[in-house]
Image (cartoon, grey):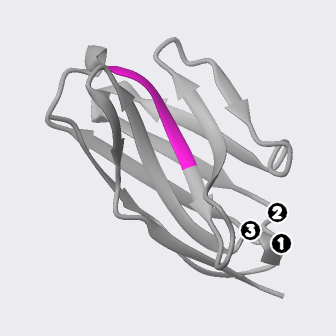
């Protein structure tokens, strides 16, 4: 059973940067098809922000392209989301998601707040 735990959220001013981390444990790296970052702002639906596949192919939501970068460190079983040029509309709870052979696994979420 794969577990994922996020860290790295916080409060930052507009234009600033944060790096989120997602540590995966409890399963073989080969059981994970892709790792995703989602976010959910108050009153809005959860949206997919970025994906990195087992082959390290990355995709991004249009709203974050050019500002966010998803990456992975296989030795540490950790996925990162580097967020630059943050905007107030990036404020949300960010969730790590593992797309595994047994289904999707979610973390508890980490709050990111961007002040104007």
Query: How far from the left and from the top, in percent, is residue 87?
Result: 82, 71
Q: Nearer the viewer, residue 9 or 97?
A: 97
Which of the two discs, 3 and 2, sits closer to the camera?
Answer: 3
**Is 45 rendered above or below residue 2?**
below
Label 2: which secondary element: loop
N-terminal-most mark, 2 or 1: 1
Mark 1 residue crowding within 10 angstroms, few (<14) / some (14–19) / many (20+): some
- State if disc 1 and disc 3 touch (CB < 8 Å): no
N-terminal-most mark, 3 or 1: 1
The residue carrying mark 3 is 90
Q: Identify the residue at image location x=37%, y=39%.
A: 78
Q: CA distance from mark 2 to mark 1?
A: 4 Å
**Is 12 rendered above or below residue 55?**
below
Q: Identify the residue at image location x=30%, y=27%.
A: 75
- State if disc 1 and disc 2 touch (CB < 8 Å): yes
N-terminal-most mark, 3 or 2: 2
The residue carrying mark 1 is 15
User: Which region of the structure is painted magenta?
Assistant: 32-37
The residue carrying mark 2 is 85
The main secondary structure of the magenta stretch is: strand
Label 1: which secondary element: loop
Q: Is residue 1 magenta?
A: no
Q: Nearer the viewer, residue 116 or 1?
A: 1
Quadrant holding the C terminus = bottom right
Q: Identify the residue at image location x=77%, y=42%.
A: 61
Q: Is residue 48 left or right of residue 8?
A: right
Q: CA distance from mark 3 to mark 1?
A: 11 Å
């Amino acid at each position: 059973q794969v577990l994922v735990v996020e860290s790295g959220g916080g409060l930052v001013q507009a234009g600033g940067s944060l790096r989120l981390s997602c540590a995966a444990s409890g399963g073989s790296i080969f059981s994970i098809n892709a790792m995703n970052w989602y976010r959910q702002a108050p009153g809005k639906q959860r949206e997919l922000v970025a994906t990195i596949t087992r082959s390290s192919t990355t995709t991004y939501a249009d709203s974050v392209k050019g500002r966010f970068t998803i990456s992975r460190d296989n030795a540490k079983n950790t996925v990162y989301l580097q967020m630059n040029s943050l905007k107030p509309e990036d404020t949300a709870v960010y969730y790590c998601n593992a797309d595994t052979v047994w289904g999707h696994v979610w973390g508890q979420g980490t709050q990111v707040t961007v002040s104007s």
